[in-house]
Image (spheres, helix red, strand yellow):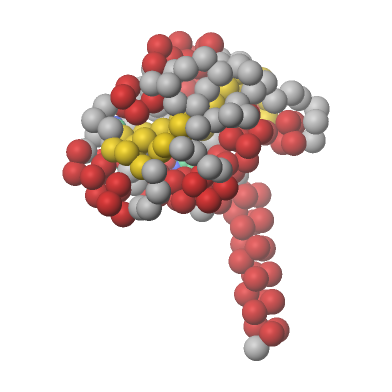
Amino acid sequence: MRTAAVSAISAKLLMSPGAEVLAILGTGKQALSHYNVFTEIFSFKEVRVWSQTKERVERFVRSVEGPVRGCSSAEEAVRGADVIVTVTRSTEPVLYGQWVKAGAHVAAVGACRPDWRELDDMLMKSAVVYADSREGALSESGDVILSGAEVFAELGDVINGTKSAQREKTTVFKSLGMGVEDAVSAKLVFDQWTAKATKS
Ligand SMILES: NC(=O)C1=CN([C@@H]2O[C@H](COP(=O)(O)OP(=O)(O)OC[C@H]3O[C@@H](n4cnc5c(N)ncnc54)[C@H](OP(=O)(O)O)[C@@H]3O)[C@@H](O)[C@H]2O)C=CC1
Ligand SMILES: O=C(O)C1=NCCCC1
């Protein structure tokens, strides 16, 4: 859930204000938590889901409520989408720049190793790239390292106002996960548990 929460913050900061269509590539654990968080926080008119296994797409669509549609290709899912979440275990690009609408926001969550990819060079080089941690992205993200794309800012820079949120441009948030996210999540759980325990 904490990973999806961070992606939702990236979308809140970087997606275009009138965003209506969300596409999710992948149908595993991260896909479900992203679906749940994104549909809870935002009001997308349509959510499109694709994965490499047709049966898993169908199962995902049956397992959730809301305006969801299964797609038979990644291209079908992402063409025209305002926000795209990539949550696959792929080691090769599954999302290509030529399919991505200008001004779309991409939360790139998979490909967390230096030689793994989810996004192609065209997308990485044409987008404004944000990361949770610049240091992490430059040492762990194949999409950043192998494309040679510049990391424009960390998400924290946008939150504290030292770097701009370039919503009008195509943006990529490269997520890798950080220990501080686990610490904050653990504190939230602990605080809620303590509050409940004190009441009873
Ligand atoms: N950035 C972060 O903080 C975090 C990142 N991650 C990363 O997110 C990704 C997804 O994790 P999780 O949801 O737990 O994984 P799951 O194993 O639950 O799901 C993986 C998904 O990837 C798809 N997939 C696997 N191989 C390929 C491929 N070659 N091409 C296209 N799709 C493929 C699977 O499709 P199918 O089922 O049809 O085979 C499935 O939909 C992983 O890369 C993981 O390392 C995870 C946690 C935190
Ligand atoms: O932050 C995490 O948790 C993970 N990040 C990338 C790889 C899978 C787990």
Marker count (numbered): 0
Going by the picture, which residue comes out furthest to the bottom?
200
Location of residue 32 in the rendering, given as x and y in whole percent from the top left corner: 40, 49
Residue found at x 40% / y 38% = 47
Ligand 1 falls in which quarter? top left
Whether residue 172 is visible: no
Location of residue 13 in the rendering, given as x and y in whole percent from the top left corner: 66, 33
Residue found at x 79% / y 35% = 160
Residue 1, compared with residue 113, is above or below; it is below
Quadrant hosting residue 166: top right
Left or right of 181: which side holds 67? left
Whether residue 66 is visible: yes
Left or right of 86: which side holds 200? right
Going by the picture, which residue comes out furthest to the left?
55
Residue found at x 43% / y 14% = 97
Location of residue 60 in the rendering, given as x and y in whole percent from the top left corner: 30, 48
Residue 46, compared with residue 40, is above or below; it is above
Location of residue 158 in the rendering, given as x and y in whole percent from the top left corner: 73, 31
Quadrant of the image containing the C terminus: bottom right
